[in-house]
Image (cartoon, rainbow, N blue to C red):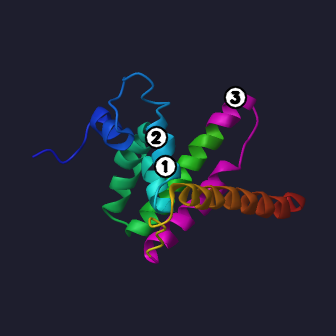
Amino acid sequence: MQTTLSLSQYVKKRNGVPLGANHSIRNRNMLSRALGAKSFPIFWHYWNPIWGYYLSRNIMRPLSQFLPIWLAVLLTFLVSGALHDLAVALVKWQAMFFFTPWFGIMGVIVIASNKYGLSYGALPWIMRALINLLFIFSSFALTEFILSLLRPLA
């Protein structure tokens, strides 16, 4: 019995089309499934399946072997944010610190949504999409606000 999905199996499960299929990465299924997800944790389940595969396999699962699942989730979001900051810093050739706290805040929303069973699956797709976008944009705004308060201290 196979316990680990291959990357191509994982992408097909998330996108509904095989890896390498015409428009598999830009597939409308990925965007539609993610935005229309019935909860914010499920939004992340569908968003960027290739990145999610490697984060799950190399960060989340190993951490969850010795940490509570909520902490493994939070640390996985923080690592993902740090890697995004690193990528932008390498392109801009300057230190970057935005994605780490932003992803941390979104990780907290995922953890809280799971803890309290927040689900809006009974709502129409457009309402689910608006709620998921609200979580993304409000966490972005909160990150901007917190960092703006910290800037004078630097």
Tell me where residue 21 appears, x and y as whole percent: 36, 23
**Local crowd size for mark 3, using a 10 Å CA cut-off: few (<14), some (14–19), many (≥20):** few
- Could you tell me which quadrant the C terminus lies in? bottom right
> Mark 2, mark 3: which one is toward the viewer?
2
Q: Amino acid at mark 1?
A: Ala
**Residue 131 left/right relative to 59:** right
Residue 52 falls in which quadrant of the image?
Answer: top left
> Mark 1, mark 3: which one is toward the viewer?
1
The structure residue drawn at horizontal position 63% and vertical position 52%, both measured from the top left corner, is 100
Q: Residue furthest front?
A: 124
Query: Which residue in the protein does label 3 denote?
Result: 91
Kindly indicate whether the residue at mark 2 contacts the one at mark 1 (C-beta within 8 angstroms): yes
Q: Was residue 39 drawn as part of the magenta stretch in this picture?
A: no
Q: Amino acid at mark 2?
A: Met
Tell me where residue 73 appears, x and y as whole percent: 45, 61
Residue 105 seen in the current view: yes
Q: Circle 2 — which element? A: helix
Query: Which residue in the protein does label 2 denote?
Result: 30
Query: Which residue in the protein does label 1 denote?
Result: 34
Q: CA separation, marks 1 and 2? A: 6 Å
Q: CA separation, marks 2 and 3? A: 27 Å
Q: CA separation, marks 1 and 3? A: 28 Å
Specify start and end residues of the magenta stretch as a single range: 87-116
Depth order, front residue of 140/65: 140
The structure residue drawn at horizontal position 44% and vertical position 47%, both measured from the top left corner, is 46
Q: Circle 3 — which element? A: helix
Magenta stretch, main secondary structure, is: helix
